């Protein structure tokens, strides 16, 4: 899971927050992943990449950017490269 929200990324990795609602969401996600044998790995990407991919506008109904228009997600999130290669 790619996110540009550093706080959300840290909460998902750490597993707890002082906000009860966020802790409950994280716990629910982790329980469901465990039940289904899914490996869930959140990581942080820049907000600029989120906008270019079109993820940023999906919640507002903006369906004419990034991957919704056929862009290959691997061009902007090169998971096959190390940080030094990027």
Image (cartoon, rainbow, N blue to C red):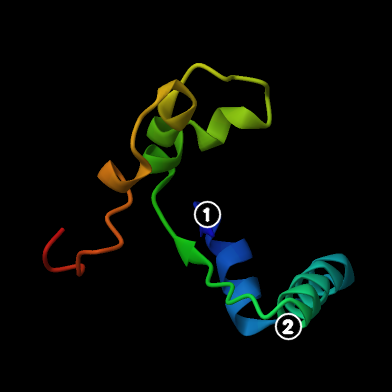
Q: Position of residue 3 (x, y in %)?
A: 52, 54
Query: Circle 2 is placed at which residue position?
Result: 34
Q: Please tell me the numbered disc located at residue 3.
A: 1
Res 85 quadrant in image: bottom left
Among the two numbered marks 2 and 1 on one chain, the one whose residue lies closer to the N terminus: 1
Residue at point 62% right, 83% down?
14
Question: Which residue appears farthest toward the front when viewing the image?
Answer: 36
Q: Position of residue 28 (x, y in %)?
A: 83, 72
Disc 1 element: strand
The front one of 30 and 21 is 30
Question: Which residue appears farthest toward the left when viewing the image?
Answer: 85
Residue at point 54% right, 34% down?
56
The front one of 53 and 20 is 53
Res 72 quadrant in image: top left
Work out which quarter of the rendered image holds the N terminus and state it: bottom right
The front one of 69 and 57 is 69
Above-or-below relation of 2 to 18: above
Q: Are there few (<14), some (14-19), or many (20+) residues within 10 Å of tag 2? A: few
Residue at point 53% right, 61% down?
6
Q: Position of residue 12 (x, y in %)?
A: 64, 73
Q: Are there few (<14), some (14-19), or many (20+) residues within 10 Å of tag 1? A: some
Q: Please tell me the numbered disc located at residue 22.
A: none
Q: CA distance from mark 2 to mark 1?
A: 21 Å
Above-or-below relation of 55 to 18: above
Instruction: State whether residue 18 appears in this view.
Output: no
Above-or-below relation of 83 to 50: below
């Amino acid at each position: 899971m790619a996110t540009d929200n550093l706080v959300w990324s840290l909460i998902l990795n750490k597993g707890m927050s002082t906000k009860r609602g966020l802790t409950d969401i994280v716990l629910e996600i982790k329980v469901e992943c465990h039940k289904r044998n899914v490996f869930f790995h959140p990581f942080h990407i820049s907000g600029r990449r989120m906008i270019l991919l079109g993820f940023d506008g999906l919640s507002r109904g903006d369906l004419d950017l990034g991957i919704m228009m056929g862009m290959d997600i691997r061009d902007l999130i090169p998971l096959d490269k190390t940080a030094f290669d990027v």
